[in-house]
Amino acid sequence: MGFFDVATATVTTILRGGLGLKVGAVGARPEKRLVIYEFEGCPFCRKVREALSILDLEAEIRPCPKSGHRFRDELVERGGKAQFPYLIDPNSGVEMYESADIVDYLYSEYGQGSAPAMIRGSAPATIAVALSGIGRGPAGAFVKPSKAPEGPLALYSFEASPFCRLVRERLCELELTYTLHNVARGSAAREAFVERSGKMQVPYLVDPNTGVEMFERAEILAYLDETYGTT
Ligand SMILES: N[C@@H](CCC(=O)N[C@@H](CS)C(=O)NCC(=O)O)C(=O)O
């Protein structure tokens, strides 16, 4: 199963042309962290996460898998409907649905120039991102029973890493809120990350609720299931 998961996640990365592997031209930096309601299996959400990696932005992720309630209900109350992704930018007070608008907004506030065609709102771009995820089936789209952590976890990651995707899927399924620290190639956050963790390798999970910090996808998945899964 592990091999199949890595293989299909790698196919997604290849079909996405490696978007989210390296940082592009960045602009102003936000003072406060962005907040995103999304779920890993949603192709529209992937475009937004790719933009986050390229623009070297971190975000607080509030996972909203189908049939989940922890953050879905919160968003419906806040924004009026269950549609993902949804961005909150506490720096400007702007909040919005629609991935194309979110990507354009992120580029206008925190990038330079316009977003690559593959993450903009055109129909071909949307079809391409949807097709790229087919190999992952329902992973990262449906809730699994879990207990809520006291506070958010943290994940060091970048969008194009297939290993990180597998961890994000599980965080999403278990509705575990986390700070997504993007450390794509060229990221300004890499040096501090290596200082903290000892080497440049992702995924790297930090759980301030238990004091655990760890590398290795398979071990992280086992930890999340054991600590928060209630199936
Ligand atoms: N045009 C929207 C479409 C978003 C959309 O359809 N998202 C789906 C998930 S991929 C959704 O919110 N479905 C409702 C649900 O999951 O309950 C966008 O680009 O953001």
Image (cartoon, rainbow, N blue to C red):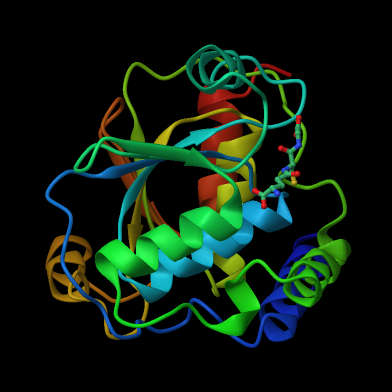
**Height in image: 2 above or below 231?**
below
Image vertical order of residue 69 relative to residue 188, above or below: above
Quadrant observed for ligand 1 in the rendered image: top right
Residue 96 percent location from the top left of the image: 48, 40
| Residue 74 appears left or right of 129 | left
155 is higher (above) or lower (below) than 107 = above
Residue 158 appears in view = no
Q: Is 105 or 204 nearer to us in this picture? A: 105
The tally of labels here is: 0
Give me the residue at 19% from left, 69% from top: 189
Q: Quadrant of the N terminus?
A: bottom right
Across and down, in percent, residue 81 comes to 65, 22
Q: Quadrant of residue 157?
A: bottom left
Q: Residue at x 71, y 71 (%)?
A: 122
Q: Residue 13, can we see it?
A: yes
* 180 left or right of 29 in image: right
User: Residue, x 54% and y 35% (percent of image)?
Assistant: 224
Residue 152 x/y as whole percent? 34, 30
Residue 57 position, x and y percent, is 30, 61
Answer with the quarter of the image where residue 18 lies: bottom right
Look at the picture and state if 231 lies above or below 53: above
Residue sitting at x 35%, y 83%: 113
Location of the C terminus (image quadrant): top right
Q: Nearer the viewer, residue 190 or 65?
A: 65
Report which quarter residue 135 is drawn in.
bottom right
